[in-house]
């Protein structure tokens, strides 16, 4: 369906895409992962010629779209693009956002467009919002409308550029669920995403982009569980961490809780945030300062580790006979998969691996 050979893109002196070669077949769901600034967005934008490539070829259904005289508007119509920021028309209702393109560009009647629009709103779960304006919707709802609006143009392929990055963590899953449903229905899609679990579950192939090329590609199993190249490994195994030191008994609990929450909401899957907050609250009530609390997220395992470190002593809620409030200890045990306490370089260390669910 799409074949890219030797695609390159320079912005003045800056070479962003060096030599991209790949094929995207009908019905495939491809996710593109990689550090930021490696040209993922530029690649998507080159695919539908929002950005003019510097070299190489892009064939769509066998047609070279980079030759002079190619029917660019028609080719672009084959590809719908969903952006990080939803780009809805603010002065139009949700339904009008969906009918404008088909009426103006596909020559469909108002009736046809509205009927199709209503179907698509049902598909993305927003039938009751047809007459609302974008401002009246949440971010997740806006993004679902943006997806429906793309679908209204009957594209052959959908390109997503980090469709959930601008969303509150609580709204990520509703958008991913819609994309997952489209995948099930056989829609061809290319998705740039930082949601590793989602990428693993939804795609049949994963491109890891780095150094201006598709650095490594494979099935989700190959890329996430057995990456071959060092850079891919480093990216996949990336750890995100946060540390907070509690100095004295009169420490500012709310400030700590707020800092943990901010970190978690930025980096962790929403399902984990609440558990971590409850757990850190219980854990810190048991301890006597000074000590350090660390929260670390291991992307690969989709797992979180909470570590307490102290120079003096730690109360281990997993140890029988400790003077631990039983309810508090029970709550903690409920969230923790595995706990190990040890002495490291004279410090007391308690490491807790959290249950994923
Ligand atoms: P990613 O999506 O992987 O984070 P981008 O494709 O957005 O990466 O950007 C890759 C590089 O190209 C970055 O260094 C960025 O600053 C640069 N870049 C992107 N768009 C432009 C542009 N229009 N003009 C100049 N430089 C750009
Ligand atoms: Mg980008």
Image (cartoon, rainbow, N blue to C red):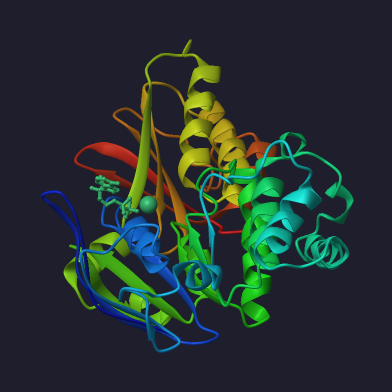
Q: Which quadrant of the figure has residue 277?
A: top right
Front residue of this view, candidates 301 and 343: 301
Q: Quadrant of the C terminus?
A: bottom right
Residue at far left of view:
13
Q: Please give left or right for residue 207 compared with residue 109 in the image.
A: left
Report the residue at 70% width, 61% height from top: 148
Give the percent coordinates (x, y) of residue 231.
Answer: 20, 65
Report the residue at 39% width, 60% height from top: 45
User: Does residue 170 appear in this view?
Assistant: yes
User: Does residue 227 appear in this view?
Assistant: no
**Vertical relation: 335 (above or below) 235:** above
**Vertical relation: 234 (above or below) 257:** below
Q: How many marks?
A: 0
Give the percent coordinates (x, y) of residue 60.
Answer: 42, 82
Give the percent coordinates (x, y) of residue 57.
Answer: 27, 78
**Vertical relation: 102 (above or below) 259:** below
Report the residue at 34% width, 57% height from top: 51
**Vertical relation: 273 (above or below) 45:** above
Front residue of this view, candidates 138 and 310: 138
Residue at far front of view:
69
Front residue of this view, candidates 347 and 184: 184
Report the residue at 72% width, 34% height from top: 135
Q: Please give left or right for residue 69 compared with residue 17 in the image.
A: right
Give the percent coordinates (x, y) of residue 274.
Answer: 63, 41
Q: Please give left or right for residue 308 compared with residue 103 in the image.
A: left
Q: Which quadrant of the figure has residue 185?
A: bottom right
């Amino acid at each position: 369906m799409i074949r890219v050979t030797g695609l390159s893109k320079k912005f003045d002196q800056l070479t962003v895409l060096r030599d991209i070669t790949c094929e995207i077949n009908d019905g495939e769901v491809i996710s593109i992962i990689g550090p930021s600034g490696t040209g993922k967005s530029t690649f998507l934008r080159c695919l539908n010629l929002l950005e003019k490539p510097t070299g190489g070829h892009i064939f769509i259904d066998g047609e070279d779209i980079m030759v002079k005289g190619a029917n660019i508007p028609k080719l672009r119509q084959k590809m719908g693009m969903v952006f990080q920021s939803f780009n809805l028309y603010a002065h139009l209702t949700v339904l009008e956002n969906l009918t404008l393109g088909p009426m103006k560009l596909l020559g469909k009647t108002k009736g046809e467009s509205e009927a199709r629009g209503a179907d698509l709103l049902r598909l993305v779960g927003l039938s009751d919002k047809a007459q609302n304006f974008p401002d009246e919707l949440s971010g997740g709802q806006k993004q679902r409308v943006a997806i429906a609006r793309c679908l209204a143009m009957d594209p052959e392929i959908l390109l997503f550029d980090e469709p959930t990055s601008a969303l509150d963590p609580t709204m990520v899953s509703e958008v991913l669920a819609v994309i997952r449903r489209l995948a099930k229905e056989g829609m061809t899609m290319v998705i740039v995403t930082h949601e590793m679990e989602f990428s693993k579950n939804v795609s049949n192939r994963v491109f890891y982009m780095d150094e201006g090329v598709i650095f490594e590609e494979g099935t989700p199993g190959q890329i996430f569980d057995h990456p071959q190249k060092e850079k891919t490994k480093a990216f996949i195994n990336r750890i995100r961490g946060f540390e907070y030191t509690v100095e004295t008994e009169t420490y500012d609990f709310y400030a700590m809780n707020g800092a943990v929450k901010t970190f978690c909401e930025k980096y962790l899957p929403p399902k984990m945030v609440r558990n971590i907050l409850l757990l850190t609250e219980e854990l810190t009530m048991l301890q006597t300062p000074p000590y350090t609390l660390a929260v670390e997220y291991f992307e690969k395992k989709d797992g979180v580790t909470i570590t307490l470190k102290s120079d003096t002593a730690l109360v281990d809620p997993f140890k029988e006979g400790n003077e631990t409030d039983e309810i508090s200890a029970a709550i903690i045990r409920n969230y923790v998969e595995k706990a190990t306490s040890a002495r490291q370089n004279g410090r007391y260390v308690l490491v807790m691996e959290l249950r994923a669910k």
